[in-house]
Amino acid sequence: MARLARGLAGLAGLLVLWELCCALGVLDARFIPPPSTVGPRIVELLGTDAEFALDTIATILTFLIALGLAALIAIPLGLLLGSVRPARVAGLTVVEFLRPLPAVALLPLFMLLLGSGPETKIVLATYAALWPILFNTMYALDEMDPLYTDIARSFGFGKVRTMFTVALPHAAPFIATGIRISASIALVVVVVVELIAGGARGVGTFILEASSGGGQMDLVLAGTVIVGAIGYLINSGLQQAQRRLFGWTESREEL
């Protein structure tokens, strides 16, 4: 409760500072409207604007699909690369080559291949979200005590069974951290692709359309604040789930 109170106090301080800067002319209200202007816009968008509700649903669904695909790809691949040394030696060079490539830099290529529909957003967000989950899975296996696998093998467990009954449970807290990090990345990429490429639906598309018309910076900022709130809620939900499931590892969790 105290942590929540401190967070709300910090947010209130930021809003007051923002309002004062606009009132004193430090910030030009034409380009950065004050909270007293942006706040009613947020309420209006969330309460009465059906089109914006559809945009928000489209962005969240795209994000969920991308994050789910990233986990489905990265976890088995991380287990393979972390458990089978020849596979790791063969695959790590490819992984290290692909990882630094920014997802947004691949946007023109995938727009040519897939168009500006949701497929492009999903592919790029999945690509960007892969890496934290993949590397957390791999490095979790590096830290596993070899005694665990030796005991499993002494009971007659094969490599596949050992991987899923010993290695995966050990890596689960690290995987959860990777998913939490990847969630923020996936949401950012989805909104950025919508903002750059447009498309039929999405909060990024809404921000793009609002920014193209004069005098609508209040809508632009309202949409931006709502995206930030969605990201905060997603991260908080995943963090709470991680604490409930893996609270015993919290003291040694690496962020």
Image (spheres, rainbow, N blue to C red):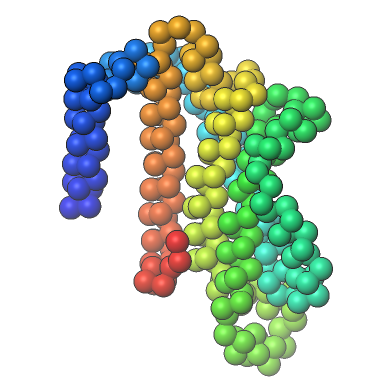
Residue 179 lies left or right of residue 14; in this view the side is right
Residue at 22 percent of width and 52 percent of height: 3
Q: Nearer the viewer, residue 154 or 1?
A: 1
User: Which residue shows up at 23% across the image and 25% down it?
Assistant: 21
Q: Toward which corner of the image does residue 63 lie, by quadrant?
A: top right
> How many numbered markers are drawn?
0
Give percent across and percent down for residue 151: 63, 90
Position of 14 compared to 122: left or right? left
Please state which of residues 228 and 99 is positioned toward the viewer in this rendering: 99
Q: Using the rendered image of the protein, determine whether residue 49 is visible from the camera's viewpoint.
A: yes
| The one of 153 and 9 positioned closer to us in this rendering | 9
Which image quarter: residue 24? Answer: top left
Q: Residue pushed farthest front? A: 26
- Vertical arrangement, residue 175 with respect to residue 124, above or below: below
- Residue 233, percent from left and from top: 39, 41
For residue 61, say whether it is visible.
no
Q: Is residue 101 left or right of residue 240?
A: right
**Residue 226 at what x, y percent from top left?**
40, 29
Q: Is residue 250 above or below residue 7?
A: below
Q: Is residue 74 above or below residue 187?
A: below
Residue 8 falls left or right of residue 238: left
Residue at horizontal 59%, vertical 58%? 133
Residue drawn at x 57%, y 85% is 145
Which quadrant holds the C terminus?
A: bottom left
Q: Is residue 193 above or below residue 27?
A: below
Q: Residue furthest top?
A: 214
> Which residue, as the protein is rendered here, is positioned at the far bottom?
154
